[in-house]
């Protein structure tokens, strides 16, 4: 019932939009549950995605596995997955400012579904999408799914193998930073879960890398970066400024200070620290 209400309120055919990746990726196959095995179950998660200014961008429905039912040593082993440090991202923005590099952004759609599973995991058929005539069968997961303990790790391994095969080298200090030098051209790629930053010396090498990624994954090309992880980029002749005014306003509203008088400085300019 909740899924149906969300579908109607969003005004979009979520069943068609969100079901396609599972079919195209071959995320699972329907099988009879082997004796002695159990399923982990799944559920739909509904959320609204907001724009940087706080307005609604789109409605989303995502199928997630009930990973909390997984048993360590049986359903999963290692779960560690690196994430690009925010300090690294700030350094990359600074480099782009100093050397006048272009910053582009891409988003990997349903990124976790690309990871390939090594373990044998069974899941109940999703509510609202039980196969007619095969109601008693279960889903044997072939590829990863949101909610699984190992999902982030499997996705990162898949991306790592793919981008290294294209001639990139990984940074030993931050495993989510990749670099490729081609003659006098250079491109730096930063992966933050399913968000990708492409920082290049020319548009040609950025376009070349984008084309490669689009052939390997279903991507959303967001063009020249405007907002990175909620941080707004403001380019000028003096360089690049970063701002998070939306988050500041959100915090002020949360604690009832949205109508407070605005100060020109963040602290009393007459205060002496010595």
Image (spheres, rainbow, N blue to C red):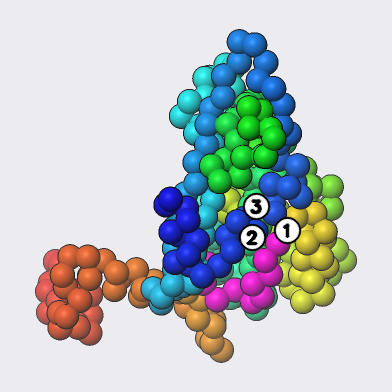
| Residue closest to the far bottom | 237
Q: Quadrant of residue 187?
A: bottom right
Q: CA distance from mark 3 to mark 2?
A: 6 Å
Residue position for label 1: 218
Magenta residues, start to end: 219-228
Indicate whether 167 appears above or below 207. above
Contact check, label 3 and label 2, Cβ < 8 Å? yes
Q: Does residue 245 appear to the left or right of 125 in the view shown?
A: left
Q: Position of residue 21 (x, y in %)?
A: 69, 51
| Residue closest to the far top | 36
Indicate whether 259 appears above or below 153. below
Q: Residue at x 55, y 67 (%)?
A: 12
Q: Does residue 267 appear to the left or right of 137 in the view shown?
A: left
Indicate whether 28 appears above or below 63. above
Name the secondary structure under disc 2. helix
Q: Position of residue 221 (x, y in %)?
A: 69, 70
Residue position for label 3: 19
- Badge 2: how crowded within 10 Å, few (<14), some, or many (20+)? few
Q: Position of residue 190 (x, y in %)?
A: 63, 57
- Badge 3: how crowded within 10 Å, few (<14), some, or many (20+)? some
Residue position for label 2: 17
């Amino acid at each position: 019932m909740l899924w149906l209400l969300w579908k109607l309120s969003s005004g979009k055919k979520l069943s068609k939009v969100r079901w396609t990746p599972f079919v195209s990726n071959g995320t699972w196959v329907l099988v009879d549950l082997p004796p002695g095995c159990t399923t982990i179950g799944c559920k739909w998660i509904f959320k609204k995605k907001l724009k940087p200014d706080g307005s609604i961008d789109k409605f989303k429905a995502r199928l997630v596995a009930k990973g909390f039912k997984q048993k360590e040593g049986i359903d999963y082993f290692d779960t560690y997955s690196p994430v690009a440090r925010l300090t690294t991202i700030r350094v990359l923005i600074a480099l782009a400012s100093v050397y006048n590099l272009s910053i582009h952004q891409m988003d990997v759609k349903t990124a976790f579904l690309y990871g390939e599973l090594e373990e044998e995991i069974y899941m109940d058929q999703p509510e609202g999408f039980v196969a007619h005539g095969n109601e008693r069968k279960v889903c044997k997961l072939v590829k990863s799914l949101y909610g699984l303990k190992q999902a982030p790790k499997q996705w990162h391994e898949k991306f790592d193998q793919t981008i290294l095969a294209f001639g990139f080298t990984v940074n030993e200090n931050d495993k989510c930073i990749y670099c490729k030098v081609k003659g006098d051209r250079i491109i730096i790629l930063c992966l933050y879960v399913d968000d990708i930053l492409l920082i290049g010396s020319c548009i040609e090498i950025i376009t070349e890398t984008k084309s490669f990624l689009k052939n390997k994954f279903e991507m959303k090309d967001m063009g020249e970066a405007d907002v990175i992880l909620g941080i707004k980029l403001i380019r000028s002749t003096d360089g690049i400024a970063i701002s998070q005014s939306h988050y500041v306003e959100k915090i002020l509203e949360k604690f009832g200070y949205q109508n407070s008088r605005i100060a020109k400085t963040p602290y009393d300019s007459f205060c002496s620290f010595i």
